[in-house]
Structures are given as C-alpha cells and as structure tokens.
Amino acid sequence: MEESDLVRRAAAGDAAAAEQIWVTHRRWIAAVLLAHKPRQTDLEDLLQEVALSVVQKINQLDDPSALKPWLRMIAVNTARATGRKQTRRRGLLRLVRPDVASESVSDLTTREGKERQARARKLGLLIDQLPENYRECVLLRCARGMSHKQISDVTGLPETTVETRIARGRRMLRELAQKPAKERAAMVEAVARSES
Amino acid sequence: MNDQVRPEPTDRRDVLIGRVVDGEATSQDWEEIRELAGDDQTVFAEIAELQELRRQTIEYVEEAGDIASRVELPSHLHPKVTPAGRMSFVGVWGGWAVAALVAVAWSIGLRPGDPLIVGDANSGTMTGNLGGAVATNASEALQQYLDMGKESGTVIGELPSGIVLEKHPLADGSGYEVLYIRPIIERATVHNVFREVQTESGKSQIVPAALPQPARQPQSW
C-alpha cells in the first residue's frame, strides 16, 4: 500500500494503518531525537511521547506527502519541550534530592557491556558537541543507511546541503575526538558562528 | 534553520572522503581521491579514521533504533477509537513511563470509601464519620489532610496527575522506583512579604516589601 494511502487511512481512524506508519519510521525518529534531545533525557520516554503525539494528531495531517517532515517536527518539538520541562524538574528535584539530581543517566547503559557503554558515552558526548543541524544529518545517515535523498525528504534540506553537512559534521567529529576539551569548545563555537 | 550552506574550499575534499567512507564513491570520485592523495598523504589515514567513527555512529544509532523498536504506538488512544477501548491501553502499551504517569494519577485520585474527615482543621485533632478514624498509613493521612484542608479552605485541591522527576530501575528488574511530585494547591494569607534586592556590592539581600495599599474608597464630600 502507498504511504499516502496509509496516512489517509490512519487519519480516518484506522489504528492498524497508524501502527504501520509508526513501525516504518520509528527507527529514524529515534535518530532525530538523539540529535535534538538534552543529554540526560531518556530516549525511550521521548519515543513514547512522540508515539502518543502521532496517534493523537495524525488526523490533523492534511497533506499525506508531508508525513516525514511532520514526524520529524513532532520529534524535534518533543525533544525541545522535554528539555525545557526537564530543566525545571531537575531544579525541583535538586531541592529534595541533591544526590539524585546530579546523576547522569545514559540511554545506552541497560544491556551493554562496560566497554560498549564507555564507547557509546564518549561518542555521544562528541556528537552532542556538533552543531545541531550537522548532528541530525550525521545521525540520520547512520539510521539504517538512509540516503541523502531520504534525509532530504525528512529535513526539507537540499540533497547537496545534506551531503555537505554530513561531510563537515564527520570531519568535525574526527577533529573533536582528537582535541582536548577546551579546544573542542572553541571549535564548535567557531563553526556555529559561521553557520548563523 | 539555515537551508543552504556556504561552500568552503575543504567541502569537496570532505564530500569525496564521505562518499568513500559510505562506499558510494564513483570511479570519477576515486580518480579525484587519488589525485588528492598524491598531494596530501593524510587522505587515506583520514578515510580509515572516519570509517571507524562511522562504524561507531552506526552502533550508537542502531542502539537507539532498538529502543525505538520496543516502543509501540498507543493505538487505543487513536481519536476514532471508542472510549471503552481506551481503558485498556496501559496493559497494551508496555511503555513504563506512561504507565507510571497513569499509575501516579490513579493513586492520587479521590478514592471512594475513604473516611470522610469532618474535624476542625486548626485543632490538630482528626475525627471522622467512622467514629474518629485515625490514619494508619501515609496515604490515609494525606487524604485526611486534603479533606480537612478543603473544609477549612486552606486546600483548594490536588491536580489529577503527578509530575515525574526521576526514575530508577529496581535492582531485581521487577519495576522502577519513581520520584514524583503530587501537586496540591493550597490557599494562604500572608502578612509579611519580602523581596530580593541587589546591594551596591552586587550581593542579593532579602528585605521586607511593602504590603499592597487597600483599594481607595471614593471620598464622600
């Protein structure tokens, strides 16, 4: 079935169609969330919020061809809103449990061995230092080998821009991995300035 | 978001290297890469490093994708689904966070059958219609406080859902410990008010603030 048909059916109340849409897209949605979420936010919680928004708002999607940008927008908005809420909540929690509030919880620590956890944490910290618009393209490229065209469909960016951002982002990532922390911050700031 | 990026001299090099790293370089790209490598010996070392970073990034994103694949759509909340169907979504949707939120909302809601307290809120004594029932646990005590507060006017009510602050998996894997706020709206009359001011040296200081002036009555002549 064509995706646009699925969207129409989901919007008309077909729960199975909505579910199929979710299953098809949830992996790259996770990559978008990774790119935009605050570091200490739990990815699974965010995914559940996105899933809830999708199911509650799919009937508001007027243009079926806009599904991917619409899903991305929900993910980006959810990540940002949760970041704001989380800052407030951590402030409140700090009042009653200073020990807990300062803890860092990684998303990737549930089942993995120590070595993999450490690698993921280190890479996550490096990726977090990329400018947001580079980060998303770099991560989406690694989401089951999404093509530049598919990333372009999701982000609304021209393909050439997608390719350039991935190339620059990876170069930055490599350079960040080689630099001490102080130099990394200056480098990220310089790139952010040139982008704005 | 900036849709276009300004081309930089290094972009072509980065893009070519990127294509090799992704295994998508054409024969023409390879020709350019070889030319580049003739002048710049670091090209192939860079490709090797980026291939390793790409492998790690794929691992990182795959892990996130695996988390995503465990998250089901709460289909029972679909707008067209009947209200009766919505009741069972907690069981169907395995996401613990939402389940925790729902559980919190459920646990702090008014429960039929709780003793109705009718004592004097200011006296410190609790008497109820069950012959002076005394709370035997924290939940009962809180309920009594809410009921008495509502009667005396110091408690407006409790919001229907809590705010989850933090959660930690239990060591035995049987669930999560959830820290949450139970938002209770209270009413108070305050006669001493304070405000924060900055001193000349820039330090914060708390000083008494003026009370609001009573609304002026029209003077009669």
Image (cartoon, coloured by chain):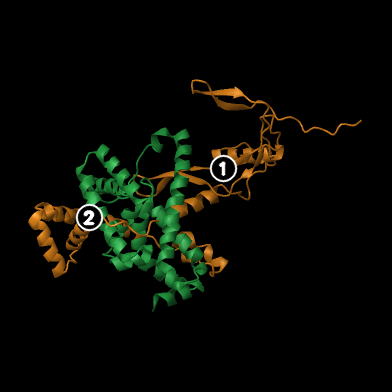
Which chain corresponds to the colour orange? B
Q: Report how far apart the C-alphas of labels 1 and 2 lie in the structure.
A: 57 Å
Q: Amino acid at mark 1?
A: Pro
- Vertical position of residue B14 compared to residue B214: above or below: below
Q: Which of B100/A159 is in front?
A: A159
User: Residue A161's quadrant in the figure?
Assistant: bottom left
Q: Secondary structure at mark 2?
A: loop
> Which residue is rendered at x = 43% and y = 47% of the image?
A83
User: Residue B43's quadrant in the figure?
Assistant: bottom left
> Which residue is rendered at x = 21% and y = 41% of the image?
A179
Q: Within 10 angstroms of label 1, few (less than 14), some, or many (20 or more) residues? A: some
Measured as percent of width and height from the top left, residue B136 is found at 57, 37
Chain name for mark 2: B
> Which residue is rendered at x = 58% and y = 49% of the image?
B160
Q: Which of B124/B188 is in front?
A: B188
Which chain corresponds to the colour green? A
Of all residues, the one furthest to the bottom in this rendering is: A1
The residue pinned by badge 2 equals B9
Quadrant position of the N terminus of chain B in the picture: bottom left
Measured as percent of width and height from the top left, residue A163 is found at 27, 61
Measured as percent of width and height from the top left, residue B68 is found at 35, 59
User: Residue B191's quadrant in the figure?
Assistant: top right
Residue B183, numbered circle: 1
User: Marks 1 and 2: CB-CB under 8 Å?
Assistant: no
Q: Within 10 angstroms of label 2, few (less than 14), some, or many (20 or more) residues? A: few
Measured as percent of width and height from the top left, residue B121 is found at 69, 33
* Residue B48 shown left or right of residue B193 in the figure: left
Q: Amino acid at mark 2?
A: Pro
* Residue B82 shown left or right of residue B18 in the figure: right
> Which residue is rendered at x = 27% and y = 37% of the image?
A182
